[in-house]
Each structure stands twice: as structure tokens, then as C-alpha cells.
Image (cartoon, rainbow, N blue to C red):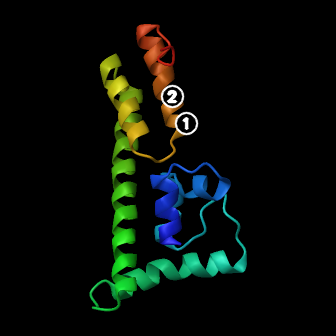
Amino acid sequence: MLKKCKEAIEDKKKDEESMAVRTTSGLRSLFEGKVPAGMSEHGNNVAVFDCLPHFHHHVTNVHCSEWCVEMRRKWKWLDEKYQAASELEGRVDEALSASEDPQLFLDLEIQMKKLDLSSRARIKAVKKKIIELIGVDSDSD
């Protein structure tokens, strides 16, 4: 499941299940052992997502198979993506409420697009703010 989540983010997959984990709330659900909104809550998914954080926390300091090591690597990668996205979303929210600097918003828009996670609402809000501040549609190339 961690491999599937990582691939969804890296490959920017757009199917419903992939989009469910390509958000900070989806990753937060994964870390909390819950099925992310948008994914089927059938028994297998509930069991897998419930087990992931427990398993991760118990094998963190244990030397085990390459499979366990690879799971820890994927967990760490997903956690780093989540932390980066959460921090960036916080900066975006702060800028939206207090800044009038169009360059800041252009930079934030670029950073959000590079992150590989889906933040459609925030990107839309940033684009709207850019248009409001400079009066130019950033999509017109």
C-alpha cells in the first residue's frame, strides 16, 4: 500500500484512489491508520490502513528483512512529502490572509505545483490572488 501511495504521488496519478492520497489530508489519514476519503472502505483497506502505523512504529528500531527496510523508506518518504506540503500550505494560508506581494504568490504557486500533491483549492486561491494583484491571468502563455 505504501508503494502504491508513493507511486500515486510520484506519477501524479489522477484516478480516484490516487487522488485520495495525493493530498495532505489523505496522507494524514494514512499516518493515523484511517482509509483516506475517496478510497473504498471495504474490509481489506480498513485492515491495511489500520495496521500500517502500528507496524511502522514497532519495526522502526528493529533489524529485519529488506521488505521491512523498504517499508520504512517509503513511510519516511511519504512523511517528508506530508511535512513539506503541510508547511507549504501553512505559508500559502498565511500569505493569502496577510500578503499583497504578487511575486510571493507566483513563487508559492510554482512550489505547490512542484510538490506533486494535489492542492487544487489552494492553487485556485493563489491564482485568484495573483489575478487580483496584477490583473493578469497566469494561465495565458
In three-dimensional space, the C-alpha distance between marks 2 and 1, rounded to whole angstroms, equals 6 Å
Q: Which picture quadrant has residue 34?
A: bottom right
The three-letter code of the residue at mark 1 reads Ala
Q: Nearer the viewer, residue 2 or 129?
A: 2
Q: Which picture quadrant has residue 100?
A: top left
The percent position of residue 91, horizontal first and vertical second, equals 34, 38
Q: Residue furthest top?
A: 135
Picture layout, residue 59 above or below residue 12: below
Q: Nearer the viewer, residue 1 or 58?
A: 1
The percent position of residue 22, horizontal first and vertical second, equals 52, 53
Picture layout, residue 10 above or below residue 66: above
Q: Residue at x 40, y 77 (%)?
A: 71
**Residue 33 in sight from this viewpoint:** yes
The percent position of residue 14, horizontal first and vertical second, equals 61, 48
The percent position of residue 73, horizontal first and vertical second, equals 34, 72
Q: Nearer the viewer, residue 6 or 32?
A: 6
Within-10-Å neighbours for mark 2: few <14, some 14–19, many 20+: some
The three-letter code of the residue at mark 2 reads Ala
Q: Which picture quadrant has residue 99?
A: top left
Picture layout, residue 44 above or below residue 39: below
- Judging from the image, what secondary structure is the residue with disc 2 in? helix
Q: Which residue is mark 2?
A: 125
Picture layout, residue 74 above or below residue 95: below
Say whether residue 2 is left or right of residue 71: right
Q: Are marks 2 and 1 in contact (CB under 8 Å)?
A: yes
- Judging from the image, what secondary structure is the residue with disc 1 in? helix
Within-10-Å neighbours for mark 1: few <14, some 14–19, many 20+: few
Q: Which residue is mark 1?
A: 121
Q: Nearer the viewer, residue 108 or 2?
A: 2
Q: Residue at x 37, y 77 (%)?
A: 70
